[in-house]
Image (tube, rainbow, N blue to C red):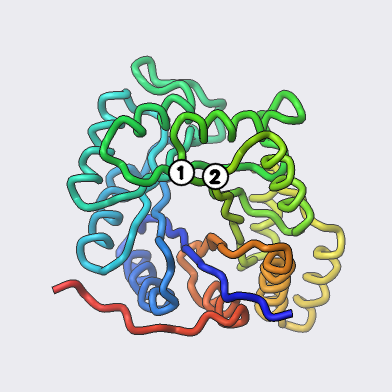
Amino acid sequence: MHLKTPKISFEFFPPKSLQASFNLWESLKILMPLAPQFVSVTYGAGGSTRRLTQEMTTTIRQKYNLDVAAHLTCVAASKQDTLALAEAYVAAGVRQIVALRGDPPNGDKFSPHKDGFASSVELVEALAKTGVEVIRVGAYPELHPEATYADANIDWLKRKIDAGASSAITQFFFDSEIFLRFRDRCVKAGITAPIIPGILPIENWDNTKTFAARCGASIPANLEAEFAMAKRNNVEDILSVVVATDLCVDLMEEGIDQFHFYTLNKPHMTRDVCLALGIEPASQLELVA
């Protein structure tokens, strides 16, 4: 069966040092020729990189011919400040927002700002009344760590879509069946907006396990043994590309035609997965005149 080449998008995080800045621009140089539908720029926990996110998002939008989605959260900001930031993005030509509740710093439990949005649903409702053209939200194919009942992930996603969200991007996962079951449950619940699978190429196995445990993403038992063997043979990067590619192919065989890659500002593995999926570099990244 011939599979149609998928659409792709990439997530980056704003740099906090000069070297990190060089790494980000090198990542853009390597990945942008793959012609992503859009790129997103994330926040730090507690809104700690709000200014850096704004600067990086507007710079990418203004300097390069790219559609950029800025992350916007409810954490540690008033409604007025949050919407002012959204308006600044629109004024800078940023068409898309990824609207999230956000995580407080130090792993604390989320507590709304006294004058802020209490949830991502409230944030989406407010953004839908502004000039933001595309509002994307997060989705959890596995149970969110704070969920209190089995269908909470589905119910919250439906509320966000009904509030005005255009599409959703999922938390990463490592088993195609997890996403497919989630997709089917969403359809049954009346969710018709696109749900884009979030793909995380595994740069560091131990770090990935820690991160997965924190966000409620399960790890298939076979991966532990496979990465242990790959480490002994010094072929971890090869295995990581194979694992991510196979995951995408499994989903493509079920009709999924778009993926959002969490790059961690490390472009080579994501590039190799995209090449393995048949995505050919289209052009070099060029500055806007």
Residue 107 figure quarter: top right
Q: Nearer the viewer, residue 38 or 243?
A: 38
Label 2 element class: loop
Q: Are marks 1 and 2 in contact (CB under 8 Å)?
A: yes
In the image as oriented, which residue stretches furthest toward the left?
289
Question: For the residue marked with disc 2, what is the amino acid?
Answer: Ala
Please state which of residues 165 and 52 is positioned toward the viewer in this rendering.
165
Q: Quadrant of the C terminus?
A: bottom left
* Residue in the picture at 71% in, 54% down: 209
Quarter of the rendering containing residue 185 = top right
| Residue 166, disc | 1
Residue beneath disc 2: 193
Residue situated in front as seen by the camera: 154 or 146:
154
When asked about the image quadrant of residue 284, the answer is bottom left
Compared to residue 27, the image places residue 216 above or below, namely: above
Reply above or below: 92 against 244. above
Dot 1: element: loop
Whole-angstrom CA distance, mark 1 to mark 2, is 6 Å
Percent x, y of residue 210:
68, 51
Check disc 1 and give the amino acid type: Ser
